[in-house]
Amino acid sequence: MKRVILSVAVMAAMGLTSCKSETKKVEEITTTEAAKEIAMTDLSFGVRGNCGMCKNTIEKAANSVEGVTDANWDKDKKKIDVSFDSSKTDAMAIHNAIAASGYDTEKVAGNEEAYKNLPGCCQYDHEMMMNQSGEMKSDDHSNHDH
């Protein structure tokens, strides 16, 4: 009889212990997911380029950086919007990856050898404006009469 009672007590203790550890696992997962959300950073900066092929190359270069979750280059504004995990990478790593593919960013000049290997339609004017608002600007005629 004592063995039966002892066996039941041991089984009950094991059951309570296993439930307690499962609760702990759920808490750890929730904490990890919250930490991921906090580490996400959104960034926008200028990148020179001309066409849809440029868009593909620029976005592919940005997405190749570990920690980048989304990259979208706007052809008209010459601007890229990037979301990344700041615990895995930083803005300069993204600038450098895009520049290595041949494209100028606001902070890093494009790799000349990579630029020369871009298709003709992708070889942009190195003086073009970047990170534009998207608004059409009227010509400035203040420096001459007419």
Image (cartoon, grey):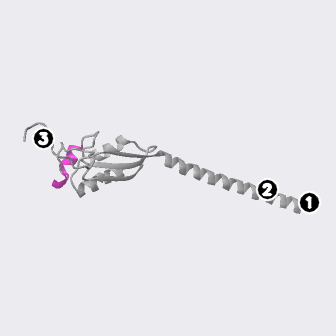
**x, y percent for residue 51:** 22, 55
- Judging depth in this view, the residue of 119 and 3 nearest the camera is 119
CA distance separating discs 2 and 3: 86 Å
Name the residue located 31 percent from the left edge and 51 percent from the top edge: 61
Question: For the residue carrying disc 1, how many other residues have a C-alpha within 10 Å: few (<14), some (14-19), or many (20+)?
Answer: few
Give the position of the N terminus as an image quadrant: bottom right
CA distance separating discs 1 and 3: 102 Å
Q: Amino acid at mark 3?
A: His
The first of marks 2 and 3 along the sequence is 2
Question: For the residue carrying disc 2, how many other residues have a C-alpha within 10 Å: few (<14), some (14-19), or many (20+)?
Answer: few
Q: Can you name the residue that lies furthest to the front here?
A: 146
Q: Amino acid at mark 1?
A: Lys
**x, y percent for residue 37:** 50, 49
**x, y percent for residue 100:** 27, 45
Q: Which residues are magenta?
A: 110-122
Q: Amino acid at mark 2?
A: Ala
* Mark drawn on residue 141: 3
Give the position of the C terminus as an image quadrant: top left
Q: For residue 127, which quarter of the picture? A: top left
**x, y percent for residue 115:** 20, 47
Vertically, is 15 above or below 108?
A: below
Q: Secondary structure at mark 1?
A: helix
* Mark drawn on residue 54: none
Question: For the residue carrying disc 3, how many other residues have a C-alpha within 10 Å: few (<14), some (14-19), or many (20+)?
Answer: few
Location of mark 2 (residue)? 13
Q: Can you name the residue that lies furthest to the top here?
A: 143
- Judging depth in this view, the residue of 70 and 119 nearest the camera is 70
Q: Secondary structure at mark 3?
A: loop
The first of marks 2 and 1 along the sequence is 1
Kindly check if marks 2 and 1 are in contact, taking CB atoms under 8 A apart as contact. no
Location of mark 1 (residue)? 2
